[in-house]
């Protein structure tokens, strides 16, 4: 994986988190729009690129990996309180255990997302038969991590965490996906396990993207605001452009 991929993964999270210092919790309209766009884009590339390859492999265990990714992500969100998809649920009283829980869930999530990036290009070539641009997974993760970093900083701010600690947490989050990619790149992972890991990522991304898209702003009503619908349409449209 090129070094600029690592740099982009790391700095994009720092950028998203840095922007959060300029806003308050109440100003979250833009965050929801960005999340909707990124969730739709991730859903699009998952259906158009990731799922076709993992199921084309012919392995009987692919479906199990997808299910595992879906439900393990569900469990991780019990620790991270949904920061991955922009939720900001501050505790009534700050505790060190709360911060550790959020960072553990978010960190493991980011680490697992980084693992397939080191060999995804090879998968793309095998599937399409030519060496074309294959950075859509990288861009999807970046688009997902920027608002997640924003939500993380807002959460820690309203929890009255010291700014120095917030920066430490943000840096840890920024480093986890590059570390996951680096560990994967330095490890001789058998091809069938690589397929399984990518299928696991499919399950995780399906969970995150569908939660973002189908979450409404009106509790008890199946109503999605027009701006969110437009953002979703643009995200899907961008993902379709990756196959043209």
Image: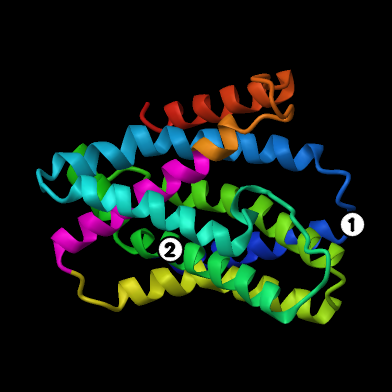
- Tell me if 141 is positioned left or right of 64 in this view: right
Q: Residues within 10 Å of mark 1 (few under 14, many from 20)?
A: few
Q: Residue at x 67, y 78 (%)?
A: 97
- Tell me if 199 is positioned left or right of 39 in this view: left
- Tell me if 59 is positioned left or right of 237 in this view: left
Q: Residues within 10 Å of mark 2 (few under 14, many from 20)?
A: many
The range drawn in magenta is 190-209
Asked whether the viewer can see residue 233, the reply is yes
Residue 207 shown in magenta: yes
- Residue bearing the label numbered 2: 114
- Residue bearing the label numbered 1: 22
Residue 37 versus residue 142 in the image, above or below: above
Residue 126 placement (x, y as % from top left): 18, 46
Residue closest to the eye, 178 or 51? 51
Residue closest to the eye, 35 or 216? 216
Sequence-first tag of 2 and 1? 1
Residue 12 placement (x, y as % from top left): 64, 59
The quadrant in which residue 212 appears is top right
The quadrant in which residue 194 appears is bottom left
Asked whether the viewer can see residue 7, the reply is no
Q: Residue at x 78, y 67 (%)?
A: 156
């Amino acid at each position: 994986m090129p070094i600029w991929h690592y740099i982009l993964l790391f700095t994009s999270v720092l950028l998203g988190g840095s922007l959060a210092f300029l806003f308050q919790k109440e100003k979250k309209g833009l965050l929801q729009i960005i999340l909707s766009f990124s969730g739709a884009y991730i859903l699009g590339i998952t259906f158009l690129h990731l799922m076709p390859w993992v199921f084309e492999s012919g392995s009987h265990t692919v479906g199990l990996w997808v299910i595992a990714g879906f439900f393990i992500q569900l469990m991780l969100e019990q620790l991270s309180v949904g920061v991955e998809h922009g939720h900001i649920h501050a505790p009534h009283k700050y505790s060190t255990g709360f911060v550790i829980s959020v960072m553990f869930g978010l960190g493991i999530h980011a680490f697992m997302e980084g693992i397939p990036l080191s060999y995804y290009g090879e998968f793309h070539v095998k599937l399409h038969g030519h060496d074309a641009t294959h950075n859509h997974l990288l861009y999807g993760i970046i688009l997902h991590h920027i608002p997640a970093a924003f939500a993380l900083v807002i959460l820690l701010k309203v929890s009255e965490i010291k700014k120095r600690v917030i920066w430490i947490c943000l840096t840890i989050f920024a480093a986890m996906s590059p570390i996951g990619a680096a560990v994967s790149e330095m490890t001789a992972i058998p091809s069938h396990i690589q397929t399984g890991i990518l299928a696991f990522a499919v399950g995780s991304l399906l969970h995150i993207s569908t939660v973002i898209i189908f979450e409404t702003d009106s509790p008890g009503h199946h109503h999605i605001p027009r701006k969110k619908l437009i953002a979703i349409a643009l995200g899907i449209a961008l993902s379709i452009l990756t196959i043209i």
